[in-house]
Image (cartoon, helix red, strand yellow):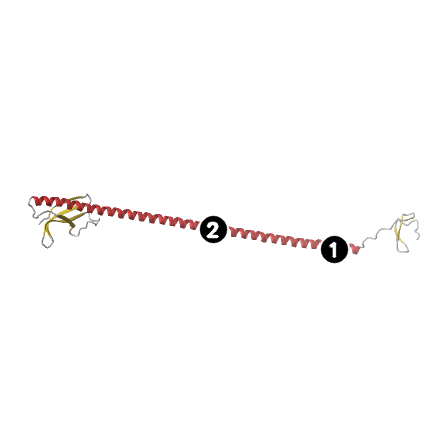
């Protein structure tokens, strides 16, 4: 294969289907270059590359969306767990507060009940003491009237052998045990002589007691 002197340097095909390089003056024995990809192959490569990028973008976007959704679900689950925990803590705190309030209320009720019972016992003790004091005053009156009756018997003001006993009891609806009464009138019987039937004859005396001052008067009953 011959080239004219005017042929420019470059690769030229040979009859056997290969290529040789012409440097403008002679043929050079250098290996031919590897055949490059044609436009269609380059186009396919570009399309494949773009498709790969698009697929990667789609996959990446889907993965990112999946991760975002999973993160959102995880955050929602954590928020729900935190809310449930807060609700449980609030419920427990409310139960503890309710139990504490109930205990305090029960304690206050028990203390009030104990105070009421103590006050009732104190009042009952004071009333018992007041009634006992009134009975003691009546016994003093009986002793005083017995002394008076013995003197009257000695002076001949009354008859009989001796003053064996004096007993007093309230009259006119009076009551020694009624603490609301400020005064009580009592009638006393001084026994001076025993009868054949076992009864006693004697004389009546009377007394009036002022429970506010504890003073009393006594003397023979008015006939």
Spot occupied by residue 125 in the image (x, y as percentages of width and height): 26, 47
Q: Give the mark nearest the N terminus, 1 or 2.
A: 1
Q: Which residue is mark 2?
A: 92
Please tell me which residue is depicted at 37% across the width and 48% down the height of the picture.
Answer: 108
- Horizontal placement of 11 versus 106: left or right? right
What's the mark number on residue 158? none
Please tell me which residue is depicted at 56% across the width and 53% down the height of the picture.
Answer: 77
Closer-to-camera residue (122/144): 144
Please tell me which residue is depicted at 13% across the width and 45% down the height of the picture.
Answer: 146
Which circle, 1 or 2, is nearer the viewer?
2
Spot occupied by residue 186 in the image (x, y as percentages of width and height): 15, 49
Judging from the image, what secondary structure is the residue with disc 1 in? helix
In contact (CB < 8 Å): disc 1 and disc 2: no
Instruction: Give the residue furthest to the left.
Output: 156
- Neighbour tally class for label 1: few under 14, some 14-19, many 20 plus, Cα within 10 Å: few
Spot occupied by residue 122 in the image (x, y as percentages of width and height): 28, 46
- Horizontal placement of 53 versus 137: left or right? right
Closer-to-camera residue (30/184): 184
- Figure label count: 2
- Horizontal placement of 20 versus 64: left or right? right
Please tell me which residue is depicted at 67% across the width and 54% down the height of the picture.
Answer: 59
Closer-to-camera residue (166/117): 166
- Label 1 to label 2: alpha-carbon separation: 64 Å
- Horizontal placement of 71 versus 189: left or right? right
Closer-to-camera residue (118/10): 118
Q: Which residue is mark 1?
A: 48
- Neighbour tally class for label 2: few under 14, some 14-19, many 20 plus, Cα within 10 Å: few
Judging from the image, what secondary structure is the residue with disc 2 in? helix
């Amino acid at each position: 294969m011959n080239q004219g002197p005017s042929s420019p340097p470059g690769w030229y095909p040979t009859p056997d289907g290969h290529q040789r390089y012409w440097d403008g003056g002679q043929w050079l024995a250098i290996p031919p270059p590897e055949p490059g990809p044609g436009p269609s192959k380059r186009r396919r490569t570009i399309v494949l590359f773009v498709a790969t990028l698009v697929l990667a973008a789609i996959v990446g976007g889907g993965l990112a969306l999946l991760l975002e959704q999973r993160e959102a679900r995880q955050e929602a689950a954590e928020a729900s767990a935190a809310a449930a925990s807060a609700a449980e803590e609030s419920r427990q705190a409310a139960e503890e507060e309710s139990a504490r309030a109930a205990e305090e209320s029960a304690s206050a009720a028990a203390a009030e009940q104990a105070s009421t019972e103590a006050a009732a016992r104190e009042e009952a003790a004071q009333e018992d003491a007041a009634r006992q004091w009134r009975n003691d005053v009546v016994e003093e009156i009986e002793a005083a009237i017995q002394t008076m009756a013995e003197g009257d018997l000695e002076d001949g003001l009354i008859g009989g052998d001796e003053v064996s006993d004096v007993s007093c009891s309230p009259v006119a609806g009076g009551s020694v045990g009624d603490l609301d009464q400020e005064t009580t009138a009592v009638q006393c019987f001084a026994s001076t002589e025993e009868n054949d039937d076992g009864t006693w004859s004697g004389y009546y005396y009377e007394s009036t007691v002022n429970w506010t001052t504890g003073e009393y008067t006594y003397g023979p009953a008015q006939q």
